[in-house]
Amino acid sequence: MVLHSRQPHTLAGRTGAISMGQEQRRAAKLRVIGGMQRGVAWREAAKAADAYLSRATAFRALRIVRSQGEEALEDRRHGRPHKLTAPVHEWLAEYCRGAPGTSSRMVRAQIEELFGTTVNISQINRARAALGVSSNSRGSGGKSPVFTE
């Protein structure tokens, strides 16, 4: 197994390589850390675990496991938290199926009132499109066509 942040996670660079999942990466890290906890040097521990971890990553992971336990190595979502959470998404699906012609601005106002969160209209439109309950109806809203003779 190869763990490296600059390359896709694949098995040893073979032709037709298999992508390494998050669980496999976590298990490889745990094997390296286990070896380090038994007193094996990080390079030998990584070699024995058939995984590549940089020295800094190995020692950072070891420090985290010692202070917070193995659960701390689970991959978590980085960046902004989801605003269109499961309860909001479920409400949106139910509401838009019942009133498909409601504008996204009105839906956004309802979400803000009910859930206390502001959601971009583009997020609402993507969710509606995925649900198949788009509010776009031909001939309503938008600019009028220009007729020339």
Image (cartoon, rainbow, N blue to C red):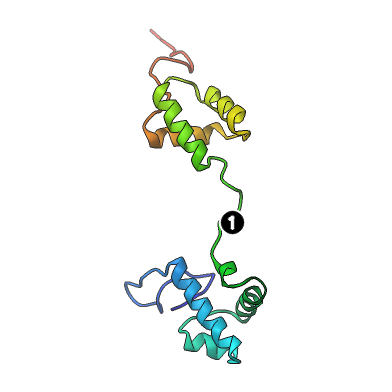
In the picture as drawn, the residue positioned furthest to the top comes out as 149
Which residue sits at x=61%, y=27%?
113
Q: Nearer the viewer, residue 11 or 66?
A: 66
Query: How far across and down, in percent of the image, does residue 84 sit?
Result: 53, 40
Query: How far across and down, in percent of the image, does residue 67 sit?
Result: 67, 73
Q: Nearer the viewer, residue 77 or 11?
A: 77
Q: Nearer the viewer, residue 140 or 118?
A: 118
Q: What type is the residue that disc 1 sits on?
A: His
Q: Tell me the element at label 1.
A: loop
Q: How many marks?
A: 1
Task: Point out the image quarter for the N terminus.
Answer: bottom left
Q: Is residue 26 left or right of residue 78?
A: left
Which residue sits at x=58%, y=25%?
109
In the picture as drawn, the residue positioned furthest to the left comes out as 16
Pointer 1: what residue? 78
Task: Give residue 136's quadrant in the image.
Answer: top left
**Local crowd size for mark 1, using a 10 Å CA cut-off: few (<14), some (14–19), many (≥20):** few
Which residue sits at x=59%, y=33%?
115
Task: Give residue 60's quadrant in the image.
Answer: bottom right
Which residue sits at x=39%, y=68%?
19
